[in-house]
Amino acid sequence: MKKQSSHFSVEDIIRSEFRKPVSRGTIGKDINGLLWAYGVVHKDSLYRVGIITINMETHAVQRIKDKESSYELKADATAYLTGLIKEILPIQSMPLLHPL
């Protein structure tokens, strides 16, 4: 008899957390190594942005309620996600500028 191995899939976690989303995906890892993901769901005439973190070692999922928001326009939800990405992801080291 074959033993089934459990397979960890970030996509499966995101799919189970955000039912019938307009869009969903990953944002990236923060400085603590947590993977951030989002789902945008259209419900009650609003685009609701849901945010979760996934611990890649334990596969624990946590909903981040204080980062969630709702918008009337999809473009506003997208703009919010763009700003959130800049807030969450570590700042890339920038090369030093040398004066002329």
Image: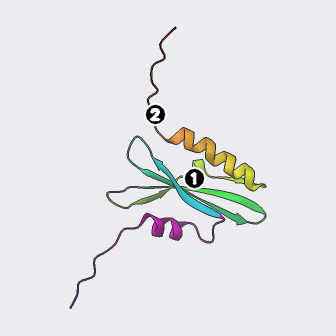
In this rendering, which labeled residue sits more in front, label 2 or label 1? 2
- Mark on residue 84? none
Residue 13 on the magenta span: yes
**What residue type is disc 2 on?**
Gln
User: Is residue 91 depicted above or below 85 in this figure?
Assistant: above
Classify 10 Å Cα crowding around label 2: few (below 14), some (14-19), many (20 and above): few
Q: Quadrant of the N terminus?
A: bottom left
Q: Earlier in the sequence, mark 2 or mark 1?
A: 1
Element on which disc 2 rests: loop
Relative to 67, residue 46 above or below: below
Q: Residue 100 in the image: x percent, y percent?
A: 52, 8
98 on left or right of 2 = right
The answer for how far apart the CA atoms under marks 2 and 1 are is 27 Å
Q: Which residue appears at 47% of the width and 13% of the height?
A: 98
Residue at 71 percent across and 65 percent down: it is 42
The circle on residue 65 is 1
Q: Residues within 10 Å of mark 1 (few under 14, many from 20)?
A: few
Q: Is residue 23 left or right of residue 96?
A: right
Q: Look at 74% across and 51% down and name the residue there.
A: 75
| Side of 1 relative to 86 (left or right) | left
Numbered label tally: 2
Residue range in magenta is 6-22
Amino acid at dot 1: Lys
Disc 2: which residue: 92
Q: Is residue 16 magenta?
A: yes
Residue plotted at (38% across, 47% down):
33
Secondary element at tag 1: helix
Q: Residue furthest left?
A: 1
Image location of residue 55, percent across then percent down: 38, 55
